[in-house]
């Protein structure tokens, strides 16, 4: 996922020196501003506030920029699914303690948001059937090879 961001917006991907196997992506300047503009409407209010406080992003200007490309929405959703999602035989699912992000997925792609029964305070966004296949078709180009194999193993898509 980080290399795909690097392809789109430049910057640098690198392995953190901590030796924990954690990768980072950094971008700044014009391309950093372009990234913020694209991803801003998909961020939670908390993350928007953090951008404003740390990067001095003018929130009103960002909100007045108009519509954003569907590819930005799809890349955002793929990042969420990549980090928090899972595939069963009949359902694609994303878990979160705060349902805000799940409601954004619901607005963009359909499906259902519900309080997950087996975990206290955990919410899930579930999508299945044709809606699930449309969701997977929209995000698959942004998913990592590891995640694509997992999804293909559950018959959500075919990999050549």
Image (tube, rainbow, N blue to C red):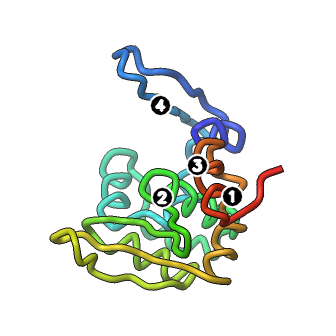
Query: Percent from the top left, x then y, of residue 13?
Result: 57, 27
Between the residue at mark 2 and the residue at mark 1, the CA separation in whole angstroms equals 12 Å
Query: Percent from the top left, x then y, of residue 69?
Result: 69, 68
Q: Measuring 69% from the left and 70% from the top, which residue is drawn there?
A: 70
- Left or right of 88? Residue 133 is right
Q: Which of marks 1 and 4 is nearer the N terminus?
A: 4
Residue underneath mark 4: 24
Residue underneath mark 2: 80
The kind of secondary structure element at disc 1 is helix
Q: Earlier in the sequence, mark 1 or mark 3?
A: 1
Q: Earlier in the sequence, mark 3 or mark 2?
A: 2
- Left or right of 129? Residue 25 is left
Between the residue at mark 4 and the residue at mark 3, the CA separation in whole angstroms equals 19 Å
Residue 140 circle label? 1
Q: How crowded is mark 1: few (under 14 residues within 10 Å), some or many (20 or more)?
A: some
In this view, the mark in front (2 or 1): 1
Q: Earlier in the sequence, mark 2 or mark 4?
A: 4
| Residue 18 against residue 7 in the figure, above or below | above
| Residue 10 against residue 71 in the figure, above or below | above
Q: Which of marks 2 and 1 is nearer the N terminus?
A: 2
Q: Earlier in the sequence, mark 4 or mark 3?
A: 4
Residue underneath mark 3: 147
Cβ–Cβ below 8 Å for labels 4 and 3? Answer: no
The kind of secondary structure element at disc 4 is strand
In this view, the mark in front (1 or 4): 1
Between 138 and 64, the one nearer to me in the picture: 138
Figure quadrant of the N terminus: top right
Query: Percent from the top left, x then y, of residue 57?
Result: 43, 54
The kind of secondary structure element at disc 2 is helix
Between the residue at mark 1 and the residue at mark 3, the CA separation in whole angstroms equals 9 Å
| Residue 25 against residue 156 in the figure, above or below | above
């Amino acid at each position: 996922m980080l290399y795909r961001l690097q392809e789109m917006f430049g910057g640098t991907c690198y392995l953190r020196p901590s030796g924990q196997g954690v990768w980072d992506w950094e971008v700044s300047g014009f391309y950093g501003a372009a990234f913020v503009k694209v991803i801003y409407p998909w961020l939670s209010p908390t993350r928007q506030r953090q951008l404003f406080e740390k990067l001095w992003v003018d929130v009103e200007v960002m909100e007045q920029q108009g519509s954003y490309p569907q590819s930005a929405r799809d890349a955002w959703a793929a990042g969420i699914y990549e980090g928090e999602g899972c595939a069963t035989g009949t359902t694609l699912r994303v878990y979160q303690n705060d349902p805000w992000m799940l409601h954004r997925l619901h607005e963009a792609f359909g499906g259902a948001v519900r309080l997950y029964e087996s975990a206290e305070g955990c919410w899930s966004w579930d999508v299945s059937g044709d809606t699930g296949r449309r969701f997977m078709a929209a995000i698959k180009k942004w998913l990592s090879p590891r995640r694509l194999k997992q999804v293909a193993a559950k018959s959500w898509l075919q990999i050549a």
